[in-house]
């Protein structure tokens, strides 16, 4: 952290997250100056939780494919515009088709999943998606709350806890339960508080782009309904992990598909992040961080790819 004290950094981080409530003359005396604030934030350890996204990245078959190409190359634009008298310019630009909600990482909008054709708040799913403008009723990704863009987050490294301190991944099909979350929280000496963002490490992140068949297979670990109830009871506002579907696959609840998604998104309005790279946080034992999540503000979209950053003292 250099010359930045832990207290300075925590004060700055709390200010960013909107968790410090001060008023009157006391606020002016304790609030850091702009330069102190920038220095404190810049003094944090920064963790990039995003994978590099390309055409070899894993995407579930039920989602649209990703494709990338340059629409204009430097040679093309130089031949067109660079030949004008006195002009030396060239540029490149791209045309991109991508899976809107399944990048690396990705966030699901509240309106992404419904239960019995009802979205969060009892909104009729058919009506909300009946126009070309995407998901209506303020449930598209453009409605992502500004205060969640910078928030306190807790990493529960369930994989490392289950493996007795080793970084080993959870076995295929492993169901994370409330007991696993409780035990990991206590072992790490942290507390998941109401309003927090929650990250759950399964250890499957290293398979992204290296073993896509396994990463996308029908047997992946993740929270089940029991863990979902724990997340809801704790008042978590955003939950994410390092798998393609967040929840355990296959579901162990009869023939019901994506039951955890329904519980979090449709029933409780809790955002879901998938495909996060949680290995850097695990290696650093950074269990409480300031999480920066900034979805693209796309009108009516069912989700967005992300560049997720975590800051720790």
Image (spheres, rainbow, N blue to C red):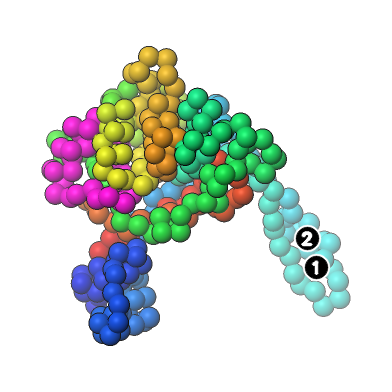
- The reply to whether discs 1 and 2 touch (Cβ–Cβ < 8 Å) is yes
Residue 159 can be seen in this image:
no
| Residue in the picture at 27% in, 28% down | 226
Q: Is residue 181 magenta?
A: yes
Q: In the visual, does 295 lie left or right of 71?
A: left
Residue 252 can be seen in this image:
yes
Q: Is residue 126 magenta?
A: no
Marks 1 and 2, the one that precedes in the sequence: 2
The image position of residue 45, as x and y in percent, is 30, 62
| Residue in the picture at 55% in, 51% down | 142
Residue under label 2: 77
State the CA–CA distance, disc 1 to disc 2: 7 Å
| Residue in the picture at 57% in, 44% down | 137
**Is residue 195 placed above or below 156 in the rendered structure?**
below
For label 2, the crowd category at 10 Å Cα-Cα, with few meaning under 14, some 14 to 19 and many 20 or more, is some
In the rendered image, the residue lying farthest to the right is 85
The image position of residue 144, as x and y in percent, is 49, 51
């Amino acid at each position: 952290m250099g010359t930045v004290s832990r207290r300075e950094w925590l004060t700055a981080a709390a200010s960013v997250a909107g968790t410090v409530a001060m008023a009157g003359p006391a606020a002016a005396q304790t609030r850091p100056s702009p330069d102190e604030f920038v220095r404190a934030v810049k003094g944090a350890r920064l963790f990039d939780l995003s994978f590099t996204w390309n055409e070899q990245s894993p995407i579930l078959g039920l989602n649209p494919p990703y494709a990338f190409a340059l629409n204009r190359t430097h040679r093309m634009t130089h031949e067109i515009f660079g030949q004008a008298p006195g002009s030396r310019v060239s540029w490149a630009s791209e045309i991109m088709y991508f899976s809107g909600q399944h990048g690396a990482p990705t966030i699901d909008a509240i309106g992404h999943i419904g239960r019995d054709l009802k979205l969060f708040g009892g909104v009729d799913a058919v009506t909300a998606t009946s126009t070309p403008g995407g998901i209506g009723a303020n449930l598209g990704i453009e409605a992502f709350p500004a205060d969640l863009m910078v928030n306190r987050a807790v990493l529960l490294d369930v994989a490392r806890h289950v493996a007795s301190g080793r970084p080993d991944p959870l076995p295929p099909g492993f169901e994370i339960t409330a007991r696993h979350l409780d035990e990991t929280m206590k072992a790490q000496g942290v507390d998941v508080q109401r309003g927090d963002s929650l990250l759950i490490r399964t250890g499957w992140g290293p398979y992204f782009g290296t073993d896509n068949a396994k990463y996308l297979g029908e047997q992946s670990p993740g929270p089940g309904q029991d863990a979902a109830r724990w997340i809801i009871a704790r008042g978590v506002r955003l939950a994410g992990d390092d798998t393609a579907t967040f929840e355990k696959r296959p579901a162990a609840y009869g023939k019901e598909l994506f039951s955890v998604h329904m519980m979090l998104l449709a029933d409780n309005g809790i955002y879901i992040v998938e495909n996060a790279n949680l290995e850097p946080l695990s290696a650093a034992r950074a269990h409480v961080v300031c999480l920066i999540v900034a979805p693209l503000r796309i009108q009516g979209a069912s989700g967005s790819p992300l560049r997720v950053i975590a800051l720790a003292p």
